[in-house]
Image (cartoon, rainbow, N blue to C red):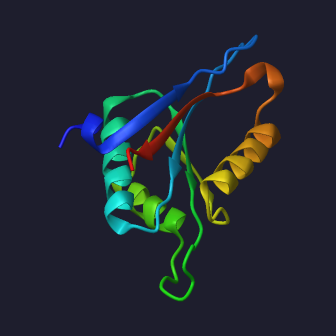
Amino acid sequence: MSLSLLFLVLFINIVFCTSTKHDVIVVLGSSDDRILNERIDSLIQYINSVSSPIIVYISGGIKHASLNDQTEASKISSRIIEKQFDHVTIVVDEFATNTAENFTYFKYWVSQYFSYNELPEVTITTSDF
């Protein structure tokens, strides 16, 4: 399957007075394993297509505690870690349980690790669902 069929990739270029740019890929979790696996596969395909250092921000907690004991973010990160990408730094948010929380926690993380003058280039991956 092509990447375009699996994912709608939104590019958000945050352009301010920047001296250093960081590339951050935000991957949203999903309680649907089929969708989650599509997102992971597309992420791996993207990582393989670039050689520059990137940060992968993985977001997703447990939506249905009675059905799952592993967070969506840990499912994603374990697949990425096993690939041993040298140019990837992984940040894991295991608390967000919906899209609003995904972005609230991501915004907080950005504010803690980047100055206003060095905001990252952000790519957000989500399914066409």
Q: Residue 86 at what x, y percent from top left?
A: 43, 42
Q: Residue 80 at what x, y percent from top left?
A: 41, 55
- Name which quarter of the figure residue 23 lies in: top right
The answer to whether residue 41 is above or below residue 18 is: below
Query: Horizontal placement of 5 versus 89: left or right?
Result: left
Residue that lies at the very extreme toward the front in this rendered image: 129
Picture residue at 31% right of the left edge, 50% below the top: 41
Front residue (pair 111, 83): 111
Picture residue at 67% right of the left edge, 52% below the top: 100
Front residue (pair 57, 50): 57
Q: Residue 40 at what x, y percent from top left?
A: 37, 53
Picture residue at 72% right of the left edge, 26% below the top: 119
Q: Residue 53 at what x, y percent from top left?
A: 50, 32
Query: Horizontal placement of 59 versus 76: left or right?
Result: right
The answer to whether residue 18 is above or below residue 67 is: above
Residue that lies at the very extreme toward the left in this rendered image: 1
Is the N terminus in the top left, top right, bottom left or bottom right quadrant? top left
The answer to whether residue 57 is above or below residue 95 is: above
Query: Horizontal placement of 60 versus 115: left or right?
Result: left
Picture residue at 31% right of the left edge, 63% below the top: 34
Q: Report the label total.
A: 0
Residue that lies at the very extreme toward the bottom in this rendered image: 66
